[in-house]
Amino acid sequence: MEELKAELKAKIIEALNLEEVTVDEIEDQAPLFGDGLGLDSIDALELTVLLDKDYGIKVTDPKIGKTIFQSIETLAAYISENRTK
Amino acid sequence: MKNAVAVTGMGMITPIGNDVAQNYHSLLQKQHGIKTLQHISGKHQHQTLVGEVPWTNAELIEKLGAEVPKNSSRTSLLAAIAAREALSQAGINVAEDMPIVVGTSVGGMDIFEQHFPHLLQDNRLIQRRDVGDSSRVFAHLLGSNSLVTSISTACSSAANAIAFGARLVLSGRADRVLVGGSDALSRFTMNGFDSLMLLSNELNRPFDANRNGLNLGEGAGFLVLESIASLKNTAKPILGYLSGFSNANDAFHQTSTSEHGEGAYLAMKQALASAALTPQAIDYINAHGTATENNDRTEATAIARLFKDQIPPFSSTKAYTGHTLGASAGIEAIYALLALQHQLAFANLRFEKTMDQPALAPITDHQTTAIRHVLSNSFGFGGNCSTLIFSHEQSLY
Amino acid sequence: MNKVYINAASICVTTPDQHHTAENWLKVDVPKIDSKLLSPNATRRMSKAVKMGILCSLEAVSQMDLANLDGILVGSSKGCLIDSDKFLQSIVEQQEEFLSPTPFIQSTHNTVAGQIALLIKNTGYNMTYSQGRISFESAALDAYIQLTMNERNTLLVGAVDELSDISIKISSILDKTTSQQQMTGISQSEGAGFFIFSNRQDEHTRAELTDISIYQAKAKLSSEAQLLAFLKKNKVPIEQIDAIIYGSANMENPFDASSTSFNKTRKINYQLQIGRFDTDIVFALDLALKLLCNQTLVQKSSPIENGNRSYQKILICNFGEQNSLMLLSGC
């Protein structure tokens, strides 16, 4: 799981163009949206694409994203359970 | 009304008809034009529900009966057909000494993407991609010798084109203008909207509580606007008046709209002010109503804010045509004018359940009612909100 | 009818030094945006066009009360080309699967105008014109009419066009013949320019935009006749024009032997300075403002010497399939 979390942090930085953020700066439990990293609805869509492309998980309802993408912790847990790649 | 200009010509080609008469007939019959994509190959062909004009480019060129430049964009062809009908109705043979203002989001992307990146070894295709080029090509087909320009503000493009054309007339810089919008379906936009998860896999349901997205469409709609003063001593029939218009920005987010629909509210409010009308004067609203969760909720919120407890009958005609993007305001301007001409507000198809918040419902059947003024909304990405108001001749003064 | 003033200007273009190379394509070196001005979170999606537009806009509005800004108008011929190319390429390479929405959103032409509005929280008029080489002038004409007719009072008007590596590559592959640069001595470049147009004169006013006109090259009158008609309409005799600043779609000299009326008028071909991009006319406008305010032009290897000249009236011409004319007057 730790490996997955580190991998996710790196992927998120790249996919969302977070140039000034390092992997170490992203805490596992910190909120990704709103405060914390300050991601928005476009980022949620990008993360949905990432889930599909890299882990084979299709999220068709944009509202589900709110729970899955809460933090690195929740995201990693969801991927572990549902990944097909 | 100090800001009014006369409409003397209308022309269109859409998924529900090749001209104004056919479109009106389809509206009357509650006949929509949305089915699975036919003409563009790839992932979406035979899968994605769209409003498609049922002619290939070759067939459109044949309809035009004119020689067109090589690799002309479908956007240009649709525009030429619609504009020709409008000019003809206005008794104009050649678009001379009349500025042309076009709203479009696709421009020539439809033809460019087909040959990207090798471009058939023809570097002239590079130019085709430009928004301005598709306007230039169709203006040339109409014999234009004056200003031709294009506005590209996503889904509000044609409304803004109509407003700028009106401004040219009101300022005295032109006695008459050709204005409207055109957009062809393209792989670029279909994939774009798909990546934003805004497309529905069902027929769209504007304002319905269970709506789940839009169906894209294509088409063109053009008007001839003329100065009232220049028409004084002519017998030219006036189809209606553009009596007010405005544009405002939501300034909230790139692709979603603010909770209170600030941009939409300001656009409607300012358009009313420009027409010197109170909200109570509006008898029918042709809503933007794309059937996305976001737009319909915020548009309804803005309508409720402005009209309070006197909400006029409203509907979205995108239930018939799909969302024709840069052309939508041009097409819907004509539907607004038809409503005025026939004193008929058009049904919002496939509406079943009212939203929770705000609890506003569109009309679900055609309504014969006295219509003096129609308000038409068009809202685009980048928070771009535009409103046009059309008035019946007898309600002008 | 109100008069129209230009109260601020800011441009972002290639430097004269860059033009010493014989490069066909010259890019602007966009300075990094101060994180105090704009957080990295806000700028991370911004393409070059958006960044140039924002930098110029922020400078242009820096001396005014934002509450007085009634709207934003932008001209761009190719829009956000980099993101548009990116999305197109991903469609081809990934066969319409796993497409990232960001480049699509960023590719819409009105992204620049929309982002500026978002940044300065402006809910006013917001317009984007895209018509090749007259994109800026279309925006300027709209602003001019609104201000003269008192529809609005103060507007931010600008233009931007960017180069894209993908488009450059395609272009280079297709056009193996002699490059534009070698043929004309003018490189393809990119840039932006933003101005504050207002019907209120104030202490920052640089000049008056006396009139603006756009006409088709194949219209009934020849270019020379068009210029003469324009000046006559504004009651300005040729002798009062201190300079004609002009650019064109290609290198053809619009003032050839047959057009004699302007023989004695000083002419400045501004594209020699900054290269060619579709909305390069913004540089001409900025140059005109500098000359009218009698700013000394200290630019290395600039073909424009200032001397003790005083400029009162400048005509800006843009020649192409559609032509534009702008008459600027000193205040």
Image (tube, coloured by chain):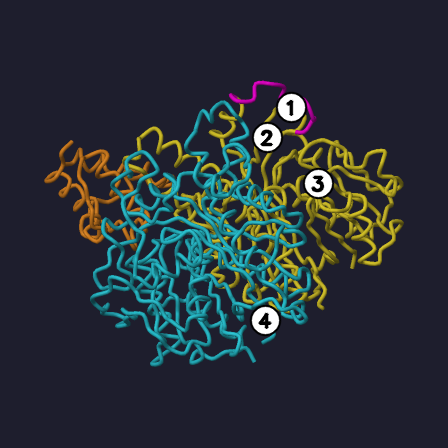
Chain colours: A orange, B cyan, C yellow
Q: Are marks 3 and 4 on the same chain?
A: no
Chain letter behind tag 2: C
Residue type at numbered disc 2: Leu
Chain letter behind tag 3: C
Residue type at numbered disc 1: Thr
Q: Are marks 3 and 2 on the same chain?
A: yes
Chain letter behind tag 4: B
Q: Given contact means CB atoms under 8 Å apart, are the residues at marks 1 and 2 in contact?
A: yes
Q: Residue at x 49, y 56 (%)?
A: B11
- Quadrant of the frame with the C terminus of chain B: bottom right
Whichever of labels 3 and 2 marks the residue nearer the N terminus, that label is: 2
Q: Badge 1: few (under 14), some or many (20 or more) residues near its Cα, within 10 Å?
A: few
Q: Residue under circle 2? A: C26
Magenta-highlighted residues: C173-186
Q: Is residue C278 within the magenta segment?
A: no
Q: Badge 4: few (under 14), some or many (20 or more) residues near its Cα, within 10 Å?
A: some
Q: Are marks 2 and 4 on the same chain?
A: no
Residue A68, percent across and down? Answer: 18, 48
Whichever of labels 1 and 2 marks the residue nearer the N terminus, that label is: 1
Left or right: residue B199 compared with residue B237: left
Q: Which type of secondary structure does the marked residue at label 3 adopt? A: strand
Q: Residue under circle 4? A: B3
How far, Cα to Cα, is label 1 from label 4? 54 Å
How far, Cα to Cα, is label 3 from label 2? 22 Å
How far, Cα to Cα, is label 1 from label 2? 9 Å
Q: Residue under circle 3? A: C319
Residue type at numbered disc 3: Phe
Q: Are marks 1 and 2 on the same chain?
A: yes
Q: Which type of secondary structure does the marked residue at label 4 adopt? A: loop
Q: Residue under circle 1? A: C21
